[in-house]
Amino acid sequence: MLASGSYSKSLPGLELDGERVISSEHALKLDRVPASVIVLGGGVIGCEFASVWASFGAEVTIIEALPRLVAAEDEASSKALERAFRKRKIAFRTGTPFQSVKTTDSGVAVTVEGGDVIEAELLLVAVGRGPSTRGPGYEEQGIAMDRGFVLADERCRTNVEGVFAVGDIVPGLQLAHRGFQQGIFVAEEIAGLDPKPIDEAGIPRVTYSHPEIASVGLDEAKAREQYGDDITTITYDLGGNGKSQILQTAGFVKLVGLKDGPVLGVHMVGDRVGELIGEAQLIYSWEAHADDVAPLIHAHPTQNEALGEAHLALAGKALHAHS
């Protein structure tokens, strides 16, 4: 079983020196809180580090080439995070490609497309992770590869008999819990237990920022691509949730579903919403309808109630509303 993990990527011509221009691995070993940081990349890793550094008092600027932060999430989640970051004085520039960086006496100077120069003590490069497949000899053994990734089917099998691949080296979500589950799947496959293939869309996703983002299933855009006008959505504001008021967190639970059909996606923003993703995964994976979830009793006051109330609203039985 091939499971050699991943490494922090950079951009062509952008060298990581481990001191002024750093990766997430370098960032975890810092013995101080930098006064100012430029974060190159507004995905999960970039937003998580930007959030924690801002909490410690650092001045943070995120540079992202795509039109919005955490672009892999539902657009509503991106907008909510951007609003929260503005309130926290975390600067970000979306739709802004990186051009170059040079070191200065006090840190780094980053030039972005258009010629603007941004200066800070450090530059964190958070442009994704690449598969760690150079060196072990995968290609020499005839393993099919694509841009460094090991190609595997839904049963984690490579093109070579008896060789499986799991985790970050296989195209898809690069999440620890995905790798764990794939490892379990392969063990059961070898044992002849005929496990059910993993539904990639059903893998829960959490961004550990402030506020958190958590999701499972299809976002609204992908759902509309597949099902067109048969899609319905509901957004339940955490302002109507007692525990969220106690925690003083804003956000929402957004449901994407088929009209008269199952829930296709659950998208949440707010502090601690990562703790709600377990029930959301069950709802998605069991193809539950809003009417199936609405009668379930959720303890009060908990944030878990927000999931229940969102499904009540989607079923046409809204209880507490906030606007």
Image (cartoon, grey):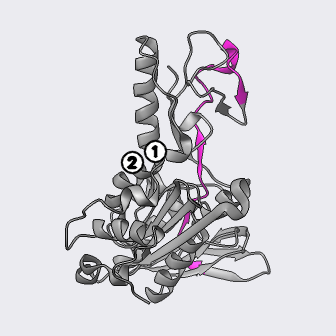
Separation of marks 2 and 1 at Cα, in angstroms:
5 Å
Amino acid carrying label 2: it is: Leu
Q: Is residue 96 above or below residue 221?
A: below
> Is there CB contact under 8 Å for labels 2 and 1?
yes
Residue 101 quadrant: bottom right
Of helix, strand and loop, which one carries label 1? Answer: helix
Q: In the image, 219: left or right of 12?
A: left
Picture disc at residue 282: 2
Q: Is residue 29 visible?
A: no
Q: In the image, 256: left or right of 149?
A: left
Label 2 environment density (alpha carbons within 10 Å; few <14, some 14–19, many ≥20): few
Q: Position of residue 298 (x, y in %)?
A: 25, 64
- Quarter of the picture containing the C terminus is bottom left
Q: Which residue is mark 1?
A: 285
**In terms of depth relative to the viewer, which is nearer, 138 or 305?**
305
Segment colored magenta: 119-145
Residue at the location (55% across, 46% down)?
Answer: 201
Residue 56 quadrant: bottom left
Amino acid carrying label 1: it is: Ser
